[in-house]
């Protein structure tokens, strides 16, 4: 008898299954487009180009049949980053530049989100790992890059949640909307979390022999013996209350 | 059955001594660890799978020294942390469960079947494709347990596994721990969790103050806390 988890709401999966042309497009191409857009848009401050890129991205959501609210869902948590950037650029440089920079960030994030919405993350990680394999000779460790990407995907929503918590706590104590007051506690909590995550990765990566070939003594069977995990974990409790 | 021998361990963080000479041999199936905040419980727990290495003394798991065979020991001794959110490292449930298998170079179908088995053992199979962040706290902690068990460790160390959970989820996790067939070592402030354990260690200021059967040990602990 397995413990039944609570019957909480089942939020929709992140990668929505779908048959749109964007879902079917090879992951490698989508990532190339994303990389090209990231590089290309970084070199322009033309509102026409940036606005056009944003419109194209919006069209991508339509083609992939992703509701627009998903797009806003990505942008809303970023407001606290975008507002200070907008203000600083506006006061220090020009308001046109401020609009351009914010449009660029929104476009790239929305595009990245569109790629993740239409590509299963394991497919994406596999593609990236494969693409990086030739760079091994330069000391790039594809497995590590893949892990870093997975971690980024995994923890974006978590950090979004942390930001919300910090903001709620500040509001509860009567502090108004102040993006700068949000930054420090959020940074501290994120760093503390990063420490925990590092430990968890360390604790769980007993199987990863890529790194330290040094300790040669490995009397523990590396491969769980045929069906041994299967045989042991699901066995009913030998002793119970 | 796992045997962990901790011999004369001192653990110093800069000038602060978190453990001040701890010696104990752990061979029972269910061992609880209690003690006040800062008494060294988590440091002790982390010693057991080599996440923390002793400044002095040694920790030997089934003949392997944690200072020399960290990875082999981590395959043998799984670890489940307090905050379920911080130990799930992949975005989707099934990917996360499989994390411990990376580097083992298992054939795909074998890996899939291990994932299936462990997910259904913990009633998570219907969440296989879900993004991990949409799970409830209890489900996340179950996922963390599943992720720790997929490599079939002989022993699992838990550091306050129920602290962040509501009553219902805490009970569910407590029952899951009780029903595990692996050796379990559980650090907790939830004394009820240790009811039917074989042995309880009470930590105090970096030392083991009491080492006894649960009823006796917990009575001493509660008495001391008053
Ligand atoms: N990495 C570290 N660097 C510096 N000091 C540390 C570190 N880890 C633990 N300590 C200190 O060692 C002492 C024991 O910490 P530990 O986490 O083992 O306590 P604990 O018994 O688990 O407490 P709690 O019940 O609060 O979890 C604490 O005073 C803590 O501040
Ligand atoms: Mg602790």
Image (cartoon, coloured by chain):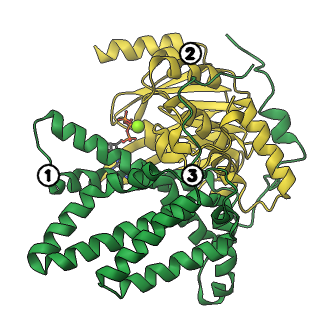
Chain colours: A green, B yellow
Mark 3 Cβ inside 8 Å of ligand 2? no
Q: Residue under circle 3?
A: B91
CA gap, disc 2 to disc 1? Answer: 53 Å
Q: Position of residue A102 (x, y in %)?
A: 28, 70
Decide if residue B181 is in sight here.
yes
Circle 1: is it few (<14), some (14-19), or many (20+) Cα within 10 Å? Answer: few
Q: Residue under circle 2?
A: B213
Decide if residue B53 is in sight here.
no
Q: Position of residue B44 (x, y in %)?
A: 48, 41
Toward the viewer: B155 or A110?
Answer: A110
Above or below, B211 against B42 in this view is above
Q: Position of residue A26 (x, y in %)?
A: 70, 71
Find numbered disc 1 in the image and state the secondary structure of the residue it sits on: loop
Q: Residue under circle 1?
A: A178
Above or below, A231 against A183 in this view is above
In the rendered image, residues at marks 2 and 1 fall on the same chain: no
Circle 3: is it few (<14), some (14-19), or many (20+) Cα within 10 Å? Answer: many
In the rendered image, residues at marks 1 and 3 fall on the same chain: no
């Amino acid at each position: 008898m397995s413990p039944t988890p609570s019957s909480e709401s089942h939020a929709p999966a992140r990668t929505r299954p779908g048959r749109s042309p964007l879902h079917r497009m090879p992951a490698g191409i989508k990532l190339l487009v994303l990389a090209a857009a990231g590089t290309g848009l970084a070199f322009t401050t033309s509102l026409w180009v940036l606005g056009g890129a944003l419109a194209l991205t919006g069209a991508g959501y339509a083609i992939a049949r992703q509701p627009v609210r998903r797009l806003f869902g990505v942008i809303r948590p970023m407001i606290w980053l975008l507002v200070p950037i907008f203000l600083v650029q506006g006061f220090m440089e020009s308001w046109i530049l401020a609009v351009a920079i914010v449009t660029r960030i929104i476009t790239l994030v929305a595009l990245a989100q569109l790629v993740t919405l239409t590509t299963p993350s394991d497919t994406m990680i596999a593609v990236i790992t494969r693409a990086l394999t030739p760079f091994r000779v330069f000391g790039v460790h594809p497995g590590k890059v893949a892990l870093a990407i997975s971690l980024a995907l995994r923890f974006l929503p978590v950090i979004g949640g942390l930001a919300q918590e910090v903001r709620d706590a500040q509001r509860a104590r009567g502090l108004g909307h102040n993006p700068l007051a949000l930054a420090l506690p959020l940074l501290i909590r994120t760093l503390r979390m990063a420490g925990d995550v590092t430990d968890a990765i360390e604790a769980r990566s007993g199987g990863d022999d890529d790194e330290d070939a040094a300790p040669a003594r490995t009397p523990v069977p590396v491969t769980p013996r045929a069906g041994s995990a299967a045989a042991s974990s699901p066995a009913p409790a030998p002793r119970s209350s | 059955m796992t045997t962990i021998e901790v011999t004369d361990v001192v653990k110093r963080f800069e000038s602060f001594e978190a453990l001040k000479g701890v010696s104990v041999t752990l061979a029972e199936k269910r061992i609880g660890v209690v003690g006040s905040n800062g008494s060294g419980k988590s440091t002790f727990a982390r010693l057991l799978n080599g996440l923390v290495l002793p400044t002095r003394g040694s920790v030997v798991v089934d003949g392997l020294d944690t200072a020399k065979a960290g990875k082999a020991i981590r395959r043998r001794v799984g670890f489940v942390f307090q905050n379920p959110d911080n130990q799930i490292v992949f975005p989707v449930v099934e990917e996360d469960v499989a994390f411990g298998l990376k580097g083992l170079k298992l054939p795909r179908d074998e890996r899939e079947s291990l994932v299936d088995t462990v997910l259904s053992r913990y009633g998570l199979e219907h969440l296989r494709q879900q993004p991990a962040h949409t799970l409830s706290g209890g489900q996340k902690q179950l996922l963390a347990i599943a992720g720790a068990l997929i490599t079939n460790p002989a022993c699992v160390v838990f550091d306050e596994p129920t602290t962040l959970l509501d009553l219902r989820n805490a009970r569910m996790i407590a029952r899951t721990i009780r029903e595990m067939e692996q050796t379990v070592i559980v650090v907790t402030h939830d004394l009820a969790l240790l009811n039917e354990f074989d042995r309880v260690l009470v930590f105090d200021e970096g030392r083991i103050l009491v080492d006894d059967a649960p009823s006796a040990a917990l009575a001493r602990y509660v008495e001391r806390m008053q």
